[in-house]
Amino acid sequence: MIPTARDVLLVIDVQGDFLPGGALAVPGGDAVIAPVNRLLGLFPHAVLTQDWHPPGHVSFATSHPGRAPFDTVPLAYGAQVLWPEHCVQGSPGADLSAALEADRAELVIRKGHHRQVDSYSAFLEADRRTPTGLTGYLRERGFTRVVLCGLATDYCVAWSALDARAAGFEALVVEDAVRGIDLDGSVARAWAEMTAAGVGRVTSGAIGG
Ligand code: VGL
Ligand code: ZN
């Protein structure tokens, strides 16, 4: 495929805490940087996301006495996986990777900033009601297709791709430019759900310009 003016590259959460040595390191997460940088050079339009939690965020295991990271707890809006403290607003781990060549990106959308609600998706928070504003932004700009890459396949990439479809966009995930956390088969489940929802898969090598 050749990116057009109706395509937007959506680069999900390429932040220190999701890279090797970070608080919630995604296995092999740094392998996405080279293909993502290549894509950033090819797409006329790109949007980045940044996971951006206040201290004491509801998704942190430390906010739930007696619970450990990767436990699941019921919250008012549904089941929530608990994570190590990560991407705390203003902390170095929340910074976008310095290796990301993102100067041309036109928007950085921060998500997960409500203390009591998580947001894996770039579009809709985990209560499934609170919008981030991205749907309106993309529609107003006339984009019709969202091409996703970044971290993590099974959480923020998958939820974003599914919500892109639900909002009426075409969605494509660049399979060699994503890596997953993989809790109990969550990567395979995420791909199955994305395929069922009409999310396409592409390799970065098949994208040219
Ligand atoms: C993510 C878990 C918690 C992600 C963010 O970027 O996939 N995963 N916060
Ligand atoms: Zn998070």
Image (cartoon, rainbow, N blue to C red):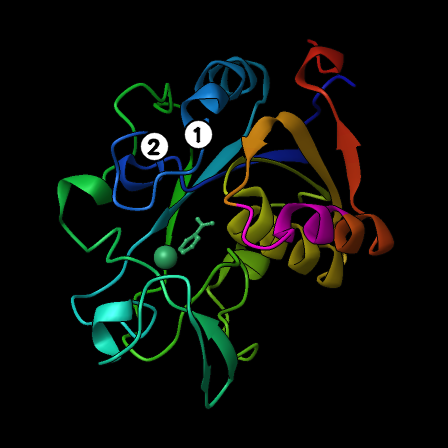
Q: Is residue 152 left or right of residue 43?
A: left
Q: Main secondary structure of the magenta part?
A: helix
| Mark 2 or mark 1: whose residue is earlier in sequence | 2
Q: What kind of element bears circle 1?
A: helix
Q: Is residue 19 left or right of residue 90?
A: right
Q: Residue at x 45, y 33 (%)?
A: 27
Q: Residue at x 54, y 60 (%)?
A: 123
Question: Where does the N terminus fall, quadrant-wise?
Answer: top right
* Tag 1 residue: 29
Pinpoint residue 104: horizontal percent, then vertical percent.
40, 24
> Can residue 120 be seen in this snapshot?
yes
Q: Residue at x 47, y 17 (%)?
A: 37
Label 1 crowd (10 A; few <14 / some 14-19 / many >=20): many
Which disc number belongs to residue 85?
A: none
Question: Where does the C terminus fall, quadrant-wise?
Answer: top right
Q: Are marks 2 and 1 in contact (CB under 8 Å)?
A: yes
Q: What's the magenta region?
A: 182-191
* Tag 2 residue: 19
Q: Is mark 2 within 8 Å of ligand 1?
A: no
Q: Residue at x 66, y 50 (%)?
A: 161
Q: Does residue 183 sit above or below 171 in this rendering?
A: below
Which amino acid, mark 2?
A: Leu
